[in-house]
Image (cartoon, rainbow, N blue to C red):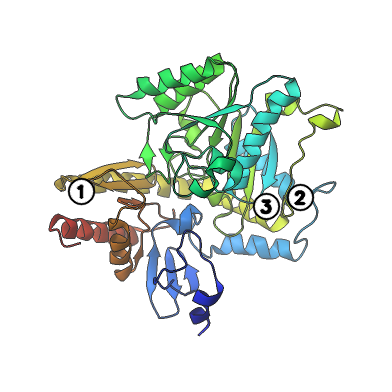
């Protein structure tokens, strides 16, 4: 039994090496289901870390990858190019990102996509000869696990061992409802110092912080203030992109548009790792220079991988099809109905946007990723063949868009059952 070797051989992410929890061995997946070696059929209610937006083993994406694999699996992307990359760049610039964006830079995951955006934002000012080196982010931010993205993430146990190696970033208060003025005032105070290069944010939803949500009106105001001071804006759409908030990108709710956008996760439908960073023409323009010191020296071995690009091209076509758009709207509507069901529980705060649904359980202390209810809930759901991976005392649903009524209802029923158990103090 191959899976019994796992504990001795594999180091899993965000997992203690002394954990006694045995990972489920998955032999195959299809649609919203994970099929395990011990015969279970588990609903993947979180799209496997938010990437499988079109369900598992989508035949059209698989076919596109197979077709591409027979022609070109990979080629160095410095000095060479290929049709899938050019086609993907064209799709993104014409159909996904704002019309002001003119260039696509390829990397291989969400952290690197954001890292590229940070470097572009900082080098923009370097190329202009201006001393702007500081970055502003929101309290509670999470942007990845590279050193640059750890720096712009709020200090936490995740990055504590490396804190002294991270660069200085100014964090402004998260714009909580009816406290938005505190955020605006803190933002203006930092910008007034005149040395800020870049404002980085998760648009409308902070994922790892517990699916904290804030309004498009607030974010529009922050971007407007940044524009007053000539500060660049980087939107981290790694989680929120490709339909998660109900629109193709979360920034589609805004009047003002960011200068740089980072994309990943759902872009390939969960088939291949791929990161994308797009930038506005005004940023591209300052790199058009014969001075070699103004070149953007960044790259990855798998930059522009043809298989990943083929998957992304097919995934985007499927995403933008009216059938999937209708399913996204239906999921959002279903979440709204489920909100009403949960009103009977006084200890819950419920919020949703698009296909993202979050429940915050009041357990008498401040919300935390390390709330002791997390593991109990995780096991409770998994025992009922539903994969929900709570962020501490925050339970969230982020299903594949191909989910049907019966499958979504099962997720709701299992959550409702868990809340009844909590209400009786039995969990």
Relative image position of residue 156 (x, y in whole percent): 44, 45
- Of the two numbered discs 1 and 2 in the rendering, the one whose residue sits closer to the viewer: 1
Residue furthest bottom as drawn: 1
Q: Earlier in the sequence, mark 1 or mark 2?
A: 2
- Of the two numbered discs 2 and 3 in the rendering, the one whose residue sits closer to the viewer: 3
Residue furthest left as drawn: 424
Q: Quadrant of the C terminus?
A: bottom left
Neighbour tally class for label 2: few under 14, some 14-19, many 20 plus, Cα within 10 Å = few
**Mark 2, secondary structure of its residue:** helix
- Left or right of residue 265: residue 335: left
- For image coordinates 39% across by 46% down, the residue present is 355
Neighbour tally class for label 1: few under 14, some 14-19, many 20 plus, Cα within 10 Å = some
Relative image position of residue 200 (x, y in whole percent): 53, 32
- Of the two numbered discs 1 and 3 in the rendering, the one whose residue sits closer to the viewer: 1
Q: Is residue 19 visible?
A: yes
Q: CA distance from mark 1 to mark 3?
A: 41 Å
Residue furthest front as drawn: 164
Q: How many numbered marks are there?
A: 3
**Mark 3, secondary structure of its residue:** helix
Looking at this view, is 318 or 96 the one in front? 96
Q: Which residue is mark 2?
A: 83
Q: Earlier in the sequence, mark 1 or mark 3?
A: 3
- Left or right of residue 253: residue 331: left
Relative image position of residue 36 (x, y in whole percent): 44, 75
**Mark 1, secondary structure of its residue:** helix
- For image coordinates 46% across by 21% down, the residue present is 187
Relative image position of residue 162 (x, y in whole percent): 55, 46
- For image coordinates 66% across by 55% down, the residue present is 308
Using the image, tell me which numbered label, if any, was put on residue 309.
3
Q: Which residue is mark 1?
A: 342
Q: CA distance from mark 2 to mark 3?
A: 9 Å
Residue furthest right as drawn: 290
């Amino acid at each position: 039994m191959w899976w019994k070797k796992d504990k001795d051989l594999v180091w899993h992410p965000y997992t203690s090496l002394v954990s006694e929890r045995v990972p489920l061995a998955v032999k195959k997946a299809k649609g919203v289901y994970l099929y395990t070696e011990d015969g279970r059929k588990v609903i993947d209610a979180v799209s496997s870390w938010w990437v499988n937006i079109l369900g598992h083993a989508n035949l059209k994406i698989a076919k596109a990858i197979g077709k591409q694999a027979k022609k070109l699996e990979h080629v160095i992307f410095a000095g060479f190019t290929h049709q899938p990359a050019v086609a993907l760049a064209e799709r993104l610039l014409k159909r996904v990102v704002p019309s002001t964006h003119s260039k696509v830079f390829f990397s291989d995951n969400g952290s690197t996509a954001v890292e590229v955006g940070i470097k572009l934002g900082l080098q923009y000012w370097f190329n202009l000869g201006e001393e702007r080196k500081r970055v502003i982010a929101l309290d509670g931010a999470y942007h990845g696990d590279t050193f640059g993205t750890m720096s712009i993430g709020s200090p936490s146990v995740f990055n504590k061992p490396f804190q002294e190696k991270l660069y200085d970033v100014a964090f402004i208060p998260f714009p909580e409802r009816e406290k938005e003025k505190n955020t605006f005032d803190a933002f203006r105070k930092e910008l007034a110092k005149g040395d800020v290069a870049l404002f980085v944010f998760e648009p409308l939803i902070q994922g790892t912080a517990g699916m904290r949500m804030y309004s498009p009106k607030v974010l529009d105001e922050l971007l407007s203030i940044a524009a007053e001071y000539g500060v660049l804006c980087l939107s981290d759409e790694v989680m929120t992109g490709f339909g998660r908030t109900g629109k193709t990108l979360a920034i589609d709710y805004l009047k003002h548009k960011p200068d740089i956008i980072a994309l990943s996760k759902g872009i390939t439908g969960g088939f291949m790792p791929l990161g994308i960073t797009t930038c506005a023409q005004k940023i591209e323009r300052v790199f058009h220079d014969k001075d070699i010191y103004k070149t953007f020296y960044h790259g990855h071995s798998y930059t522009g991988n043809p298989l990943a690009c083929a998957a992304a091209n097919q995934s985007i076509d499927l995403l933008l099809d009216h059938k999937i758009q209708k399913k996204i709207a239906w999921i959002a509507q279903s979440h709204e109905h489920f909100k009403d069901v949960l009103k009977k529980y006084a200890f819950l705060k419920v919020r949703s946007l698009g296909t993202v649904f979050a429940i915050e359980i009041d357990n008498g202390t401040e919300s935390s990723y390390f709330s002791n209810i997390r593991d109990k809930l995780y096991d409770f759901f998994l025992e009922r063949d539903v994969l929900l991976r709570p962020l501490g005392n925050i339970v969230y649903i982020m299903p594949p868009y191909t989910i049907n009524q019966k499958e979504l209802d099962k997720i709701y029923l299992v959550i409702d059952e868990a809340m009844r158990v909590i209400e009786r103090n039995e969990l």
